[in-house]
Image: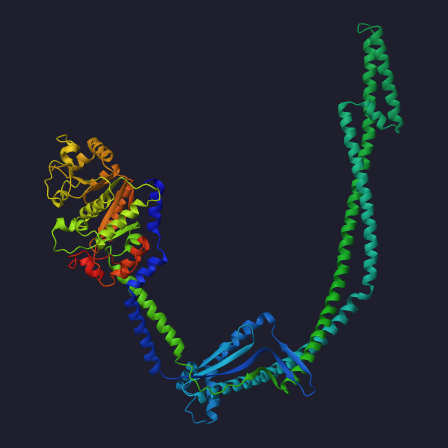
Amino acid sequence: MDEVVVEEIEEEGERFNLGDLWAILRMQRWVILASLVACVAASAVWTSIATRYYTSTATVHLTTRRTLEMELGEQMEEGVTDWQRPTYLKTQVAILRSSSTKRRVLQEYEKLQKGDGVKADAAGIALLTRAVNYVPRAGTELVDIVVTTKDPELSASLANFMAKTLRDESSNVATDAANDASEWLVGRMAEYDEKISDASAELREYQRAFDIADVEEQETSLSARMSSLKQAYGQANTEKVQAETMVRMHEQQLRLGHFEELSRAYETDSAVQAQAQAYATAVLEFAHTRETFGPKWPGYKDAEGRVKIAENQLRMEIERALAAERAKLKLLTDRELDLQDAIRAGNEELLEVQGKRDDYEKKKLDLQNAKDFYKRMTLRDAELELQSKTQLNNVRIIEDARPNPRPTSPNVLQNALVGIAVGLGLGLGLAFLREWLDDTVSSPLDVTTYLRARLLGIVPRVKENMQEADRTLYTVANPKSTVAESIRAIRTVLELSPSGQSPRRIMLTSALSSEGKTSTTIRLAIAYASLGRRIVVVDADMRRPRVHKVFGDERVPGLATCLVGEATPEEAVRPTHVKNLFYLPAGKAYDRPNELLTSSAFAKLIEELDRTFDMVLVDTPPSVILSDARLISRHMEAVILVAKERATSRFVIREALRGLRQVNANVLGVIINSVDLRRRNTYSYYGYGYGYGYGYGNGYTYGNEPGDEDDDTESAAK
């Protein structure tokens, strides 16, 4: 079978679908039903004996704005802002739930002498705490006062009384607060009256002391003078920078000896120009002498000396002119500093004048603020006086409470639903707990869910008082029994492979011994042989061989004999009384049979059997205890794991599967062997898996062979 088919089989075993869940529920239906009935009955009993409670509700409008209702029909409103409303409502509800509020309510209620036994003591407060609940309606300013007691009349009476008390208490609190605020305002108004008088006198005194009337004229004059000074300072700074630049440039030219450029710079200075003309004449005469007579002429040095004398005189004149420029630069610098001092002094004087004006404006503003605040306090005092003499309230009763003749507790429907929910939950929990505590393979769900493998089929149990050979060859004597049909169903699964080709080499193993792998191997071989194919069964369990015992023959010659070269496959393979069925016994015993299984002789033997027969089925030792099965799986196209019902731990079988998959064995799935169909719920347990996988429904039966009345499987089917 190719790799795609192997992946598909593994994925199918890993899915836990609704069908698997339904199988568990059907198996444990009596546990679930018993839990459901018990919980519903307990709920009914509790409902019948529980004390009846009656609930009444009064609704009040707890607005965040107080309304002043006046005789003239006008309304004045005050209150908190919209964003403060949720906090305000929560605060008011918390106050209503406080012990002090409850005590005041009980004291007023007791004064009415209703005779219902509710007192303003610890017991009354406890009763009110249990009975009353304030429920704000989401998104509104409405609050429901819900009262629950054993007496419907008492519930309605308490709810209405608490609503009225809340309204009256709110009115009294608001009126007292208005009176207190009015008293505080009167005191503050007296303080501000005195403050206004003092501020007015201080303002007049300040105005006389600093002649505030001339401040604006002084500020205007100073601003004009400062503007003139700043303009003069800018001009002086410009002239100074120009002179400073000229002096530095002339000094540099003087150091470099650029007399001609300097003479052009001082073209207005007659002395410099005359000396420059003399210097130029001396230079021309010296040049003429040098070109005409040469350096050796006696008059050459005289001409050269006249040039130096003229140059020194020109330098002296230029230095004199440069000194005059430096003097002018100093005058400009001094003028700039004087202007800076004048501007600084003017700024200080201007700031002083502006400060006086600002102080005056501040004192004037303080006086005006005091007057405005006094005016607002006067208006507020008038409002508070009006509020103290009119009804002020932010609580309005929307709906009065009425006695409810029907009890609200216990709630029959709610208790019934709770009983059903608890019963189902408890039943499901017990069902899955029972399933989890059973660690053996006992259902198809165990294979697909816990082992993560594919279920190939189940094989019913054959009665145990039969001989081993008769049990193994049971399908030969009873071809219409459920055992035979189950084997044929497994054969069908292997034949209808998605790859379109049935595996030719199949190895059957188990996790531990005594799980029925040998009998399953032979029965599966018989099922294939009935199709007219030549089948050979190889007994590879050389430690505890059983195939030769089933057919009543000797174990030698056999597999081990062929592997050591003491016999050929033609000599060792033997026919059986079943048509087209042959077997190769284990052969003589060896101390280390796994060494024979790893030899190349074993691979050649399997290849030869594959060429000779249509199918090779190999019976191997348990795969968890020994490594033989994993060694043999390398030469097989498919591996099947046989697990006995309620015999081996799922953990051990999972280890067997993991060991086979570690060596890349193509594990097709698991066969559950020796299923007891007489056990209670067996058909509902396996009918789902059997019918789902192979098309057989619940209570499947094929028919009895003559003389099969004692067959356990057939009697169970009946």
Q: Is residue 614 above or below residue 251?
A: below
Give left or right: position of 456 versus 282. left
Q: Is residue 461 above or below residue 536?
A: below
**Looking at the rendering, which quadrant does residue 244 occupy?**
top right
Q: Which percent across, then down, holds residue 169?
A: 54, 85
Residue 299 visible: no
Q: Is residue 410 above or below residue 278?
A: below
Q: Quadrant of the C terminus?
A: bottom left
Give left or right: position of 404 versus 422. right
Count how many numbered circles sit on residues in the image. 0
| Residue at 27 percent of width and 59 percent of height | 685
Return the residue nearer the eye: 629 or 466: 466
Q: Quadrant of the N terminus?
A: top left
Q: Which percent across, then down, holds residue 407?
A: 42, 84
Q: Which percent across, then down, holds residue 309?
A: 82, 18
| Residue at 73 percent of width and 72 percent of height | 368
Q: Which percent across, then down, holds residue 676?
A: 20, 58
Residue 322 visible: yes
**Looking at the rendering, which quadrant does residue 43 occupy?**
bottom left
